[in-house]
């Protein structure tokens, strides 16, 4: 979307201002984390940023980090995926912007699920999901781009959420994900007919 191009332009201007400064690679790392990756955070907390824009911003970051100036070619010694890993597992701790965007939108959905006294909840509840919770809400034609973005955040929560069995009265053992494991949280065995009722 052209509406978000201002983010890339702001980042490019910042990087151009720093390009002439004599910074070590560690200095460039600090500037990238403190400034460049922080610029789109507010917007990413409200809207799903196009993947193409995320890749463009990451391309600017990679060039700056490896010391590339203008059309000059520099070797990128490590894949970007390795640099986005935590420092605890030998990465550099840079943010994967698309995943960071998803996590910020999931946070908004989480607020709509739990903070039921906030004005944010009251406005969105009345407008977009008056008869259900955010987890059952669906996209509507009247929904704004912000609402569709929050629904994408809801999908992130649904992928990682697990039912808490409790007393077992409201859970559907074969339909709801409740098994605490990394992959499928659904029961893998066949459903017996007499238990289906």
Image (cartoon, rainbow, N blue to C red):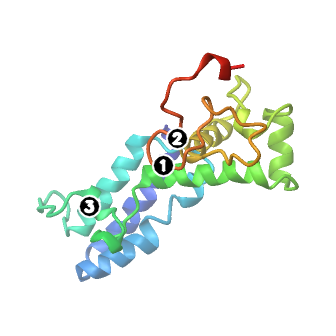
Task: Looking at the picture, tell me which residue is in the foreground, 77 or 12.
Answer: 77
Q: Nearer the viewer, mark 1 or mark 3?
A: 1
Determine whether, in the image, residue 67 is placed left or right of residue 129: left
**Cα distance, mark 1 to mark 2?**
6 Å
Bin the neighbour count of mark 1 within 10 Å (Cα to Cα): few under 14, some 14-19, many 20 and up.
few
Q: Which mark, residue 181? A: 1
Pointer 2 and pointer 3: residues touching (CB < 8 Å)?
no
Q: Which residue is mark 3?
A: 82
Bin the neighbour count of mark 2 within 10 Å (Cα to Cα): few under 14, some 14-19, many 20 and up.
some
Q: Which residue is mark 2?
A: 185
Label 3, secondary structure: give it: helix
Tell me what residue is drawn at x 34 percent, y 55 percent.
58
Pointer 1 and pointer 2: residues touching (CB < 8 Å)?
yes
Q: Position of residue 7 (x, y in %)?
A: 48, 54
Q: Which mark, residue 86? A: none
Bin the neighbour count of mark 3 within 10 Å (Cα to Cα): few under 14, some 14-19, many 20 and up.
some
**Cα distance, mark 1 to mark 3?**
25 Å
**Cα distance, mark 2 to mark 3?**
28 Å
Label 2, secondary structure: give it: loop
Total number of numbered discs in the rendering: 3
Q: Nearer the viewer, mark 2 or mark 3?
A: 2
Determine whether, in the image, residue 141 is placed left or right of residue 70: right
């Amino acid at each position: 979307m052209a509406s978000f191009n201002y983010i890339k332009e702001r980042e490019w201007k910042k990087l151009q201002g720093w390009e002439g400064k004599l910074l070590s690679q560690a200095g460039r790392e600090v500037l990238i984390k403190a400034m460049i990756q922080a610029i789109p955070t507010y917007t990413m907390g409200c809207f799903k940023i196009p993947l193409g824009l995320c890749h463009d911003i990451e391309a600017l970051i990679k060039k700056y980090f490896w010391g590339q100036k203008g059309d000059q070619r520099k070797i990128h010694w490590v894949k970007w995926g390795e640099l986005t890993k935590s420092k605890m597992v030998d990465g550099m701790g840079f943010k994967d912007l698309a995943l960071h965007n998803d996590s910020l939108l999931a946070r908004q959905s989480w607020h709509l699920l739990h903070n039921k006294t906030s004005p944010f909840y009251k406005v969105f509840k009345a407008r977009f999901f008056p008869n259900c919770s955010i987890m059952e809400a669906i996209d509507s034609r009247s929904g704004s781009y912000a609402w569709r973005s929050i629904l994408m955040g809801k999908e992130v929560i649904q992928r990682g959420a697990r039912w808490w069995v409790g007393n077992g009265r409201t859970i559907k053992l074969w339909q709801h994900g409740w098994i605490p494991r990394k992959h499928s949280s659904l029961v893998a065995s066949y459903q017996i007919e007499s238990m289906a009722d």
